[in-house]
Amino acid sequence: MTRIIWRPQHDKQLIVLYERGMNDREIAEKLDVHQGTVGIHRRRLGLAAYGNKRLFTNQQLIEIHEQGLFNDAEMGERLGADQRTVCDHRKRLGLKTKWGKQFTDQQLIALHKKGMNDPAIAKELGVRDHVIFGHRRRLGLPAIPVKGRARLFTDQQLTRLHAQGLNDTEIAKKLGVERSTVGTRRRGLGLKPIGGRGRPW
């Protein structure tokens, strides 16, 4: 392959091809350059990497997002992609998350007064458990335990282990609970996920 000198017009070409949903390999073939060269300049331009194969187009994501009915995970199911991929592309397109509150504080308070716990309120309002968990804490409402389920660890324990750089799997192992339980409580506490040991996802 003939090595070319990267010039300003190549940035424009890269962006156009990237917007068409092409990954580094496909762009490299179009521009007749090394894939690594594309990766370097893509990162310089602040563009997130695509996987080996783009499973959906920007327009498909925009169209399903505009329906206003689905969060990232649900859009991923419909587009045949994972939640993280959808989230990355949604952010790059400047589309707002659908995790926003879809209910009023008064609705949550009223259901809480009826003695409903977080999972029950979440089901009633059509959102995930951790969304209710976070808003309930913000409102200063005490947790109502799920029948037959003991509270296995405190928020302080989770926060301390998270501050040590442990990810959900490692924290779950330390506390003797399911990873999904840790993930739900962590999101409710507003703590960012950690991937590999001490590395944010």
Image: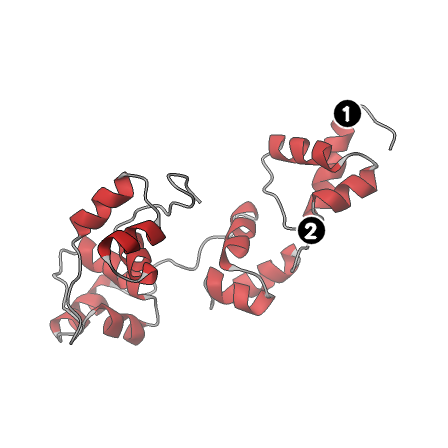
Quadrant where the N terminus lies?
Answer: top right
Quadrant where the C terminus lies?
Answer: top left
Would residue 137 appear left or right of 95 to someone viewing this image? left
**Cα distance between the residues tagged 2 and 1:** 22 Å
Residue 66 can be seen, yes or no: no
User: Which of 120 and 169 lies nearest the eye of the viewer?
Assistant: 169
Q: Residues within 10 Å of mark 2 (few under 14, many from 20)?
A: some
Q: Furthest-right residue in view?
A: 2
- Where residue 102 appears, as percent x and y from the top left, is 34, 64
> Mark 2 vs mark 1: which is more N-terminal?
1
Would residue 57 appear left or right of 135 to someone viewing this image? right
User: Which of 172 and 98 lies nearest the eye of the viewer?
Assistant: 172
Task: Give above or below for 20 relative to 118.
Answer: above
- Residue designated by label 1: 7
Would residue 157 appear left or right of 187 to someone viewing this image? left
User: Which of 117 and 68 lies nearest the eye of the viewer?
Assistant: 117
- The count of marks equals 2
The residue lying at 73 percent from left, 35 percent from top is 12
Task: Give above or below for 197 relative to 102.
Answer: above
Q: Residues within 10 Å of mark 1 (few under 14, many from 20)?
A: few
Name the amino acid, label 1: Arg
- Where residue 156 appears, as percent x and y from the top left, is 17, 47
Name the amino acid, label 2: Gly
Q: Secondary structure at mark 1?
A: loop
Task: Give above or below for 194 relative to 139.
Answer: above
- Residue designated by label 2: 21
